[in-house]
Image (cartoon, rainbow, N blue to C red):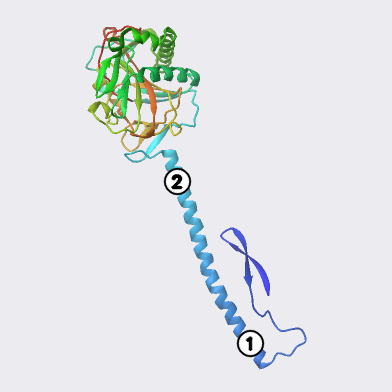
């Protein structure tokens, strides 16, 4: 018996090969020996043939596995969304000091009053993880959690608007300042509102720098709100957050939209990515606590949010207008009521 090491598909595995390797030295080979030797050669060929077939199939299998793996890696990088292939504009594992993509402005701004030095002439979308810290995001999220603990939608999307007081409760909205009255003082603190204001100011400055405009020309506008989204089925139209839309069409006052994410994609929730919709391939932003995504609000930035499949996704939409007539003040503990909003 002899043992040979046979290389198969790049791996060396021991294969046991048995058979007569020849006659002993000095021995005369008889006819019967020759017959036996012929039988051995035929046996060896018979063993070798299936081994060659196995070797070919193993090579095919290894090649197929490599091709599949490469495809999965590419798929993961492109980040297929519910509509097909999408390019990942900002991945969850990335920490971005800033990323900006300029796109041609739509005609949406031509039909409205223009404000020099503010109305978009340069359009695009940006993402940064350097504007708000993860600790600030954690503290801002606690404000959302405290407010939403007072109500919450029966469906998958709940809204809290500290400016207008709008709060999702069941299938409706209430004004939390009127509904809960003085009890609000036990829910929120002045420090909560101070933090909220400071975060808004940082986001406003980041937008102004990215688009080359004066921060003082931007005015906070409505609706600006917290959203909490989970996988619960929609109960009303307000819960159907996943439809594609243009902010300037949905909310006429918007000129610049920003989103501050307060939870982590794939850690706190699945699905729920933000998708810029384009011909050919969409571009996705994977939420990360403290990540700020911002963009001009016209049709050049048609977008939607994927359905959340599990967990809970928190974010705050902070919107700005160039028109001071559409501006709103920072929230106080007793503001008036206002409109409902769509999560993003």
Q: Residue at x 48, y 60 (%)?
A: 60
Using the rendered view, name the quadrant where residue 26 is placed: bottom right
Residue 32 shows in this picture: yes
Q: Which mark is residue 92?
A: none
Residue 121 shows in this picture: no
Query: Which residue appears farthest toward the right when viewing the image?
Result: 26
Q: Secondary structure at mark 1?
A: helix
* Frontmost residue, 296 versus 236: 236
Q: Earlier in the sequence, mark 1 or mark 2?
A: 1
Query: Which residue appears farthest toward the bottom when viewing the image?
Result: 31
- Circle 1 packing at 10 Å, graded few (<14), some (14-19), many (20+), is few
Residue under label 2, please give it: 72
The relative height of residue 72 versus residue 279 in the rendered view (above or below) is: below
Point out residue 222 in the picture as x, y percentages from the top left corner.
29, 14
* Frontmost residue, 147 versus 301: 147
Using the rendered view, name the quadrant where residue 19 is placed: bottom right
* Frontmost residue, 336 versus 189: 189
Residue under label 1, please give it: 36
Q: Residue at x 67, y 89 (%)?
A: 33
Location of the N terminus by quadrant is bottom right
Q: Residue at x 21, y 17 (%)?
A: 111
Q: Secondary structure at mark 2?
A: helix
């Amino acid at each position: 018996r002899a043992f040979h090491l046979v290389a198969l598909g790049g791996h060396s595995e021991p294969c046991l090969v048995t058979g007569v390797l020849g006659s002993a030295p000095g021995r005369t080979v008889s006819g019967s020996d020759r017959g036996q030797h012929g039988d051995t050669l035929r046996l060896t060929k018979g063993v070798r043939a299936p081994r060659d077939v196995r070797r070919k199939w193993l090579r095919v299998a290894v090649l197929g596995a490599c091709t599949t793996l490469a495809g999965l890696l590419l798929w993961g990088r492109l980040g297929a969304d519910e509509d097909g292939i999408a390019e990942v504009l900002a991945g969850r594992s990335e920490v971005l000091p800033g990323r900006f993509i300029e796109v041609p402005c739509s005609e949406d701004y031509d039909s409205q009053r223009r404000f020099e030095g503010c109305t978009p002439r340069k359009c695009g979308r940006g993402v940064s993880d350097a504007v708000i810290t993860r600790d600030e995001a954690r503290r801002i999220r606690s404000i959302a959690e405290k407010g939403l603990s007072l109500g919450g939608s029966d469906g998958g999307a709940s809204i809290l608007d500290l400016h207008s007081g709008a709060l999702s409760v069941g299938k409706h909205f209430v004004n939390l300042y009127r509904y809960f009255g003085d009890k609000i003082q036990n829910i929120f603190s002045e420090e909560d509102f101070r933090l909220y204001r400071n975060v808004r100011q940082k986001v406003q400055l980041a937008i102004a720098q990215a688009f080359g405009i004066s921060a003082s020309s931007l005015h906070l506008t409505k609706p600006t709100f917290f959203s909490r989204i989970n996988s619960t089925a929609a109960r009303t139209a307000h819960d159907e957050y996943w439809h594609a839309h243009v902010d300037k069409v949905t909310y006429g006052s918007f000129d610049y939209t920003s989103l501050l994410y307060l939870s982590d994609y794939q850690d706190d929730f699945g699905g729920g990515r933000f998708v810029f919709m384009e011909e050919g391939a969409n571009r996705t932003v994977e939420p990360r606590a403290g990540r700020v995504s911002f963009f001009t609000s016209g049709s050049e930035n048609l977008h939607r949010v994927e359905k959340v499949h599990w967990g809970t996704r928190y974010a705050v939409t902070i919107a700005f207008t160039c028109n001071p007539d559409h501006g709103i003040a920072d929230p106080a503990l007793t503001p008036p009521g206002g409109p409902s909003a769509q999560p993003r």
